[in-house]
Amino acid sequence: MTDIKHHAYLFDATRCIDCRACMVACSVENNIEMDKTRIWVAGLGVTGEYPNLQRSTMVYHCMHCEHPDCMSACPVGAYTKAPDGPVSYNPDVCIGCRYCMNACPFGVPHFDYDKGIIDGAFIDKCTFCPQRIYNGQEPACVQTCPTDALEYGDRDELIKRAHERIAAHPDRYINHVYGEHENGGTSYLIISHVPFKDLGLPELPETPINEVSEKVMEMTIPFALSWGAVLTAVTVGVAAYEKKNGKGKAEQTK
Amino acid sequence: MKLNITLPKFLRIGTLPLILILFMAIAFVVAMMRYAFGIGAISDLSYSYPWGFWISFDLFTGVVISSGGFLMAGTVYILRIKEFEPLLRPSILTAFLGYIMVAVALLVDLGQPLRIWYMMIHWNHTSVLLEIGICVMSYLTVLAIEFTPVVLERFPKLHKVAHLIHKFIMPFVILGVVLSTLHQSSLGSLLLIQPQKLHPLWWTPILPILFFSSAVTVGMAMIIFESTLSSRYFQRGLETHLLAKLAKGLPVALGFYLVLKFGELAVAGDLGYLFTSGVMSALFWAEILIGAVIPLIWFSIEKNRANPNRLFAGAVILLLGMILNRFNVSWFAVKHPDPLFYMPTFMGNVKYFPTLPEVAVSIGIFSAGIMAFGLIAKYFPVFEAEHETEETHAPVRRLHPAPTAADD
Amino acid sequence: MTKTISRRDFLKLGAAGAGALALGSMLPPKVAEAARAAGTIDAEGNGFVHSMCEMCVWRCGLIAKVVNGRVVKLDGNPEHEHSRGNLCPRGQSGLMNTYDPDRVLTPLIRVGKRGEGLFRPASWDEALDLVARNMLAIKEKYGAEAMVFSSTHNLSQPLFENLLYAFGSPNYGTQRSLCFNAMIVSNLMTYGMEEPARIYDDKLKYIILTGRNLLEAISTSETHDLIMAIDRGAKVVYLDPRYTKTASKAAEWLPVKPGMDLAFHLALLHVIIRERLYNRWFVEQHTVGFDELKKEVMRYTPEWAAPLTGISAETITRIAREFAKAAPHALAHNGWRTSNFVNSFHTQRAISILNALVGNWNVTMTAAAEEGAGLGAPPQPPYPRVSALRLDGVPWKYPVVPFKLGVFQELRDNIVKGEPYQAHGWFISRQNPIMSLPDRAKTLEAFGKMDFIVTVDIIMNDTAWFSDVVLPEASYLERYDPLLPVGDKAFIRQPVIEPQGEAKSALWIYKQLGERLGLGDYFQYEDEEDYLRQQLAPLGADLEEVKKKGYAEMPESEHAGFTWNTPSGKIELYSDTLAKVGFPGVPTWEEPPQPKEGQFYLLTGKVAQSTQFGTQNNQLLHKYSDEPRLWMNAKTAASLGLATDDWVEVASEVGQIHIKLLATEAIRPDCVYLTPGYGHLSKGLKTAYGVGASDSVVHVTYTDPISGSQALSQTFVTVRKA
Ligand SMILES: Nc1nc2c(c(=O)[nH]1)N[C@H]1C(S)=C(S)[C@@H](COP(=O)(O)OP(=O)(O)OC[C@H]3O[C@@H](n4cnc5c(=O)[nH]c(N)nc54)[C@H](O)[C@@H]3O)O[C@H]1N2
Ligand SMILES: Nc1nc2c(c(=O)[nH]1)N[C@H]1C(S)=C(S)[C@@H](COP(=O)(O)OP(=O)(O)OC[C@H]3O[C@@H](n4cnc5c(=O)[nH]c(N)nc54)[C@H](O)[C@@H]3O)O[C@H]1N2
Ligand code: SF4
Ligand code: SF4
Ligand code: SF4
Ligand code: SF4
Ligand code: SF4
Ligand SMILES: [Mo]
C-alpha cells in the first residue's frame, strides 16, 4: 500500500455502468439498514429521442469537502475533518437539528426519520470506511467496482491522474476535474463526459461556501461587545440627561 | 327544558379556551406519536427536505413576531421614553411566551430533544445555529427576569423582591437587546450557508441586516397588533395615541429595509431575477408589496395612524408580508435536490407539503401560547403601568374589572 | 419519505441470525470448523476465508470476512482472474442469500396438494429414503428412462451426472438450450470447441457485440475488460433493439430489428469477401470451405440487409471495413444468451466465421482450457449402457446437438405429450425450470404428469414449491464443492460458516442418495474433504494449504496453437457435418417470423442486480433494484394512450400477464421488454413474491432446428391497458 497523505476518491463517469455494486458493498460493509443508504446514483438517466440517446450516471456519496459545510454548520461540532481527508460524524453529540443537511451543498447527510426517541434519531453519511482505509484496504465501494469507475488514492495523485486522463482523451472528457477546486476542494473528485450538472452536481464557487457565514460568526462577539457598550453609554447618557433636566422625558410629554 | 346542572365555577370553560385546549390536546397526541415512531411518522420531512413548516413557522416566524419585547424594553428602559410603559409588559410577556413556544416546537422538531442542552456544552464556534441557540436560551432567561416583577407584584409580600430586581434590571435589559439583535439577525445568517440552494432574490451576504431591520418593523407591528387584540379581549382601553406614535416610526424603518433590499440586489446584479423567475418573482413581489410597500404607504397617512381599526389593519398587512418573507427564505425559495436523484426510491421524495399532523403541532403550541397569555393576563398585572417611582403604592387596581378567559 | 418502505432491518437480521429465526429458535452461530482447523478463523470466530462466488456461473474468487462466526462482508479476491478484487452487485450481496430468512434449512416433504406449499420438515434419513424408494419404484415400473434429471451448471455437476447416468436415464435437462446452445453448437461446428476464450489485450481496437449486454449481464472480469478496452479507445459496435447500459457506452448503438442480426452479419461477410478484406493467408492456411461460403454470401449485399435490419447499407459496409481494418485486433463477440430466434444458429455461425475470415485467431480469441483437466477424481465404474431414446430429441431430432447440452424445452414438451414414452419422475437440482422454461403453464402441466418430483435448492424457489420433496443444500458460503481451475490455478470453495440448520452440501446429498440407490461405487469418497484430496492428488498439493491460500497451482496448459478439433482439423467455414444431416453447410439466410400488425416483439434480458430467477428474494439486491416494468417506446405508448405506471395486460398465444408500463425512449418502437425473474409463484419467497410479472408465462416455445436453442425473442405479444 502506497503512503496516502490525503485520502481521496476519483470517479470517472465514463466508466460507471450503474451496476450498484458499490451501493450493495457499502450497505454490507457498514451494516446499513434496508431502507437507508449512504451512497446512491444520480444523473438524468436516459435522455434524448430514439434513436439518438445518451445515458450517464454518477455515484454519489459524501464529498469529504476540504472545508466541510456540514462541519461549519453543526452547532454542537458533531463533524470532524481529519487532516488526511475523511469527514466524520459523531452521533454522541448530535442533537438532530438537521442543519447539516441544509448546509451540505450536496445533500449528503441523511436522517433517521423513522426513529423515535427511544431508538434515537441520528444523522448518517459516508464515513470513508475508516475501518478499511486505516487497515490498508480500499473503501468498500471502491474496492468492489467492477469497472474501476471508482478509484481511491492520494488526492494529489488522483488529481494528476484525472488530468492525465483528460489530456489523453480530450475529445471524451469535459476539461475539468470537479472537486479539485469546487467549494474550496473536495476529496471526491469527478471527471465526466457530460456536464457536471447532468450528474446532479451543483455549480459551486472555488471559495468555500461557509466563508461568508464563518466571517459573520467571527464578527459576532466583537459586535456584541460594541453594541453592548453603545447601549450602556446610551443608557447612562439618557439617565444623565434626565437628571439634568429634572424630570423624566416621558412625563414631560404626558 | 332546562338542565339544572351548574358546573362549579372553576370548571366552566369558555368557547375559545375550549378550542385552544382541543388544539393543544391534538398537538400533544401528535407529538407523542412523533416521539414514539419518529419525525417521519407524522411529517413530510425527508432527505431532501430536512426543514419544513415547523422551522418556517415556529422558528422563523415565532422569533420574529416576538421582537416587540426587546423593542419596548429598549424604548422604555434605555431611551427612557416612559410613555410607552403601558405597552412594555404585554410586549415582554408576548416575547417570553413566543420564545417558549419556539423552544417547545424545537423539542418536537429536534431529532434528539433530550439533548437540546448539549448546545450549552458542545460549542462549535463557526455555527450560526449555535449562536441562535445560545442567544435564544439566554434571552429567555433575560425575559424571565424582566417579567418576574410582574409576577411578584401579584403577591404583596414579595414586592420588596420585585423592587430589588427592578433596581438591577438595566444590565439585563441591555443584555436582552444585544441578544435579540444578535439572534434576530443571525436567523438570516442561518441561510448564508446555502447560496446555491436559496434563490438569488433572497440570498445575500447582508441577510442578517435585512433580518434585523425587518424584525424591527415586525416588532412594531406586533405591538400594535397584540395591543389592539388584547384591548378588545380584555375590554381594556387602547393606548391609540401611543400606537400612533409607534406607527409613525414604521415608514422610516420600512423605507430603510426597502432601500437595503433593492440596493443589495442592484449591487449584486440580481435585479434581473425580479421579473424572470416565475413563481419566485411573484413570491418576492408579494412579500415586498404586502410586507413593506403597502404598509409604508399606509402608515405614512396620518388618518390611518389615528384610527385604531386602521392601525390594526396596517399591522396585519405588514405582518402577513413579513411572515411570507420568513417562509420564502426558509422554505419556498429554497431549492432542493430534484429528480436527478432517481435512485433508490426511498430517497425519491423531492416534493414537500406539510402534513396535517405537522401543522397540528404548530397550531397546538400556538394555542398554548394564547392560552398562557390569557391566563397570565388574567391573574397577573400585565396591563398596568409599572410604578417604580411610586414605591409605596400597592399595585393599582384594575381600571376595568377584566373578564377572564374562563368566564367568556 | 421513508414511510412507504417496510422496515427490513439488515442489522437486526444479521444480529439475530436469519436462519435461526426461520427455525424459530436462536442458535448460537457455528464457526466453520474446517476454516478454524485451517487457521483462517481464530478461536473467537474471526478471520478471512477464501472461497468462490456462486451468485452466477462466472464464479469469481472471494474473500469472506467472518466476525464471531458470522459472514459480515465479501470482497473480491485479487488473485482470482474472474474477480480481480472486484465483485458485481450480486456477488456483493451473496451473504444475504445465505442469511435469507426464507432459506430452506431442513428436508421438506409435501403434505398438501402440489403447489399449495404445505410441507412438513423431515429428517435427512426419512427424506432420502423416500426419494430413493420413489426413484427405484419408477425404475422398476417404467424403466430408468422414466426418471428425468435436470440441473443448471454448477461445480458438483459431475456427481449429479453420476447419479443420472449410473441410474441409467438418458434424460438430462440443462439450462443450455435456453441460454447458449446456438453459440456452442456453432463454435463446435466451426472451431471444434465450445467457446473459444476471448482476449482483451492492450491492442484490441474493435469489438462487435451482438446482443451481448456485458455491462448489465455481468461477468465481472469480462465486464471490466470491456470497459478498459473502451477506456483505451477501442471502438464498440453494439447491436440490440434496446438502449441498454452497454449501448450507452458503445461508440455505436445499432437498434437492430430483432432476429435480423443474421442479415447484418451475412452482409458483413459479404463486404469482407467482396472487397477482399479478409486475411488471405489465414483463410488459406487454416480454414476449409471458403468457396462455398463465398458463393452463399454473395447474395447478401448490404443493400439487401438494410431494410431487414433497419441499419443502412453504408453503415454495414463501413463497419465491415472498419472491422477488417482493425483485424486481427478485432473481436466479433458471439454473445452468450444467444437463444433469440430460430435462426440464431446461423447468426452465431456467421459471427464465428467473421472472426476466422479476418484472422483473429490467437490474437483476440483462442482455445479455452478444458474444464477440470489436470485434476484427479475418485475412481468409478463405467456407466451402464442406456438404450432408451432421449425425450429431448437428441440426437434423433437434433443430430448436431451434443448430449450434454440437450434441448430442455423439447424434453418438457415430450413429457407433456408422453412421447416417445411417458416420464414419471423428475429430479431437479439448482434449477428453476418453472420460471426459466418458456410457457410456464406447459411446464406446470409437465409437472402434473409426474408421480414424483424432488428438488435440491437453497430457498423455496418456484420449482421446489411444486415438488414433493425439497432437499436443502448448504449455501455456497457453507459448503465444499469440487475445485474449479481458472488459468493456472485451481480454486477452492470451502465453508466460510458451518451450514445453518440441516442443510448439506451436494457432494454429501448425492453420495447419500447414490448409496441408497445402490450406486455407491460412483461416489467413492469419504466426505467432501476426501473428494478434494483426491482431486488435488495429481497436483501434489496439500488441502490444508489450499484452504489457506484459496487455490492450488496447476501446471500451465499448453496452447492449442493452430489446430482445431474439427473433422478437417481446420476452421470449418463450410461444415460437412452439418451438410451430412441436411443442414446448410455455410451460414444461410433464414427469415425469422415477424409480429403481425398490433403485436410487439417481447424481449428479455438480464439486469445487473439479479441473476436469472434465484436472487429476487435477496433483500440487498431487492433494495437496489429498479421496479420491473414493461418497457415500451415512449412514442408508441403515447399513440396507444398508455403512460408510465399504467397497468397493462401483455398477452401472447400461450398466456397473459399484468404489469406496470415504463414508457421510455430506450427501445425500438416495435419491441417491448420485460426484466426476467419476477412474478414468482412461490409464496415461500417473502421478499420477491408479488413483485412484477413473469415473461415465461407469455413466452412461446420455438426451437432452433439446428442448435436446439429456445427462441426467447420470438414471442409476439399484444399490449393493452389492463
Ligand atoms: N447480472 C446478471 N448477469 C448475468 C446473468 C444474470 O442473470 N444477471 N446471467 C448470466 C448468464 S447465465 C448469461 S447466459 C449471460 C447472458 O448475457 P447476455 O448474452 O448479455 O444476455 P441477456 O441479458 O439475456 O440479453 C442481452 C440482450 O439481448 C437483447 N436482444 C433480444 N433479442 C435480440 C435480438 O434478436 N438481437 C439482438 N442483437 N439483441 C437481442 C436484449 O434486449 C438484451 O439486452 O449473462 C450472465 N450474467
Ligand atoms: N424469460 C427468460 N427465460 C430465460 C432467460 C431469460 O433471460 N429470460 N435466461 C435463460 C438463461 S441464459 C439461463 S442460463 C436459464 C437459467 O435457468 P435456471 O438455471 O433454471 O434458473 P436459475 O435462476 O439460474 O436457477 C438457479 C436455481 O438454483 C438455486 N440455487 C442458488 N444457489 C444454489 C446452491 O448453492 N445450491 C442449490 N442446490 N441451488 C441453488 C436458486 O435458488 C435457483 O432456484 O434461464 C433461461 N431462461
Ligand atoms: S459533502 Fe456535505 S456532508 Fe460531506 S463533507 Fe461536504 S458538506 Fe459535509
Ligand atoms: S443534525 Fe446533528 S450533526 Fe447535523 S447539524 Fe444538527 S447536531 Fe450537527
Ligand atoms: S467510503 Fe465506505 S461509507 Fe463511504 S460510500 Fe464508500 S463504502 Fe460507503
Ligand atoms: S460499482 Fe462502479 S460501475 Fe457500478 S455503479 Fe458503482 S461506481 Fe458505477
Ligand atoms: S459475476 Fe458477480 S455473481 Fe457472478 S460470480 Fe462474479 S461476483 Fe458472483
Ligand atoms: Mo445463461
Image: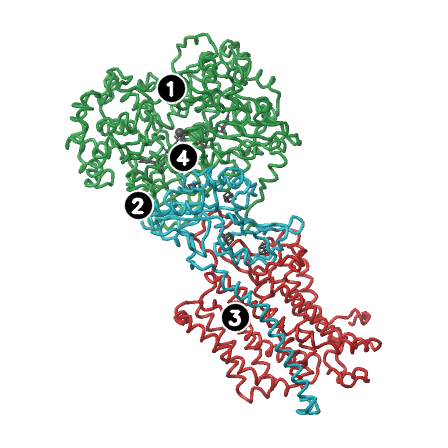
Q: Which residue is mark 3?
A: B325
Judge the density around disc 1: few (<14), some (14-19), many (≥20) Cα neighbours within 10 Å. few
> Residue A75 at what x, y percent from top left?
59, 59
Whether ligand 4 has any atom under 8 Å from the Cβ at mark 3 is answered as no
Q: Which residue is mark 2?
A: A169
Q: Which chain is cyan?
A: A
Q: Nearer the viewer, residue B46 or C708?
A: B46
Give the colour scheme shown.
by chain
- Marked residue chain, label 1: C
Q: Colour of chain C?
A: green
- Marked residue chain, label 2: A
Estimate the spatial distance between the alpha carbons at disc 3 and disc 1, rounded to whole Å.
Answer: 77 Å
Which residue is depicted at the point 68% across and 88% down? A242
Which residue is depicted at the point 21% across and 21% down? C287
User: Tag 4: residue type?
Assistant: Ile
User: Tag 1: residue type?
Assistant: Glu
Q: Which chain is red?
A: B
User: Tag 2: residue type?
Assistant: His
The picture quadrant for ligand 8 comes to top left
User: Tag 3: residue type?
Assistant: Asn
> Residue C370 at what x, y percent from top left?
37, 19
